[in-house]
Amino acid sequence: MRLVFAALVSTLLLPVQGPTASARFPVRVEQLLVNARFTADDRRQLLAGEAVARALPADASKELAVFGAAWIKAPIERYVQRLTDIEQFERGGRFRLTRRISSPPQLADFAALRLSDEDVRDLRSCAIGDCELKLSARAIQRFQSEVNWKAANPRPAVDAVMRRLAFELVTAYLKGGNQQLEVYRDRTRAISPAAEFRDMLDHMAELPLYGPDLRRDLTEFHGVTPSNSTSFLYWQETEFGLKPIIRISHITIRQGATDTIVTSKMLYATHYFWTALDLRVLIPDPARGPGFWLLTTSRSRTDGLTGLTGLFIRHRARSEIVEGTLKVLSRRRRRSSRRAVDHERPADCGFRSALTC
């Protein structure tokens, strides 16, 4: 029996014949594939050079999650360089405008921030517990007290308040971390982005697989980037669902000897999302040749997924986040075959995760 078992194991470890350079994955890659419940067919597609994406288990009442993987035939350093130039990396398609925030932040960083006409109209009647935008009680009160809603054109004042709020948010976050993110009072129930973010991390079985101390770095950030990392904040206007949103995110890039880990944490969004996180790990595979495995997990918490209408939205959302992630990974893979990792020009991302759209 021992001989039969040994022969079986040896057979399973034989290289798969075909166009792939290696029929096995690095241990860390395999662990993430197992966690995402990738099938044998999924693995064959990856080894053949295709991108694969799958929805992940998540709290159906408020969370969307997707995992994707692809082989990128390009240097990791090139990907990191392009990502650092975020204004070019995330532009075109549904990305209307992307702006990197200075260090330290300046009010001028938000000079181009402009709310939609619909948002300006909605803010006129915005009240605590009943507001179309995701805002804190303090922010709602400022829009009511600092804007002359009887003016012929209140927009300049509205945009000025929003820019100041955005500047104050990132300044406070860099000093005090997640606890400085204000509680939303756009609905009858108050929502704490910091609490939702922490709870989301507590339920992420895949989090330890991305790297040690990652949870601590994400939850205990107080303005100091780890010594082996670089980070920056940026804001952008992007189309999502039925309306455009303004969102602010914090990216950290940790480059190690064996991998590169990228985290993108959403700090604020004007609509839909309470919190969101995008994790990416870039793992070289010398047995396969030049390039790296790109594995990404995107999770976001949002309202609107409960009730009869929520059931329909949730079903559609799960399908579209997988399809959207697959499109982005496939696009990166194709561009890498042309020896470049160009900026993203995403197709229709529908209800995809806020961070991968």
Image: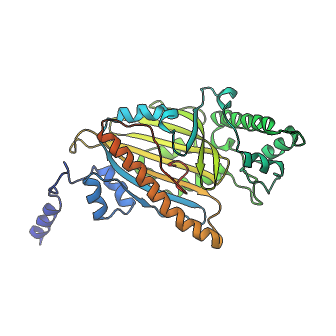
Q: Where is residue 44? Give x, y as percent.
A: 26, 59
Tell me the colour scheme of the image. Answer: rainbow
Q: Where is residue 223? Give x, y as percent.
A: 60, 33
Q: At 63% from the left edge and 53% from the top edge, which residue is drawn?
A: 273
**233 left or right, relative to 271:** left
Q: Where is residue 341? Give x, y as percent.
A: 37, 37
Q: How many badges with numbers are in the image?
A: 0
Q: At 27% from the left edge and 51% from the top edge, which residue is drawn?
A: 49
Q: At 81% from the left edge and 36% from the top edge, which residue is drawn?
A: 157
**245 left or right, relative to 35:** right
Q: Where is residue 167? Give x, y as percent.
A: 69, 33
Please say whether residue 58 is visible from this viewpoint: no
**204 left or right, relative to 5:** right
**243 left or right, relative to 75:** right
29 or 319: nearer the viewer: 319
Q: Residue furthest front?
A: 152
118 or 273: nearer the viewer: 118
Q: Which corner quadrant of the image does residue 287 belong to?
A: top left
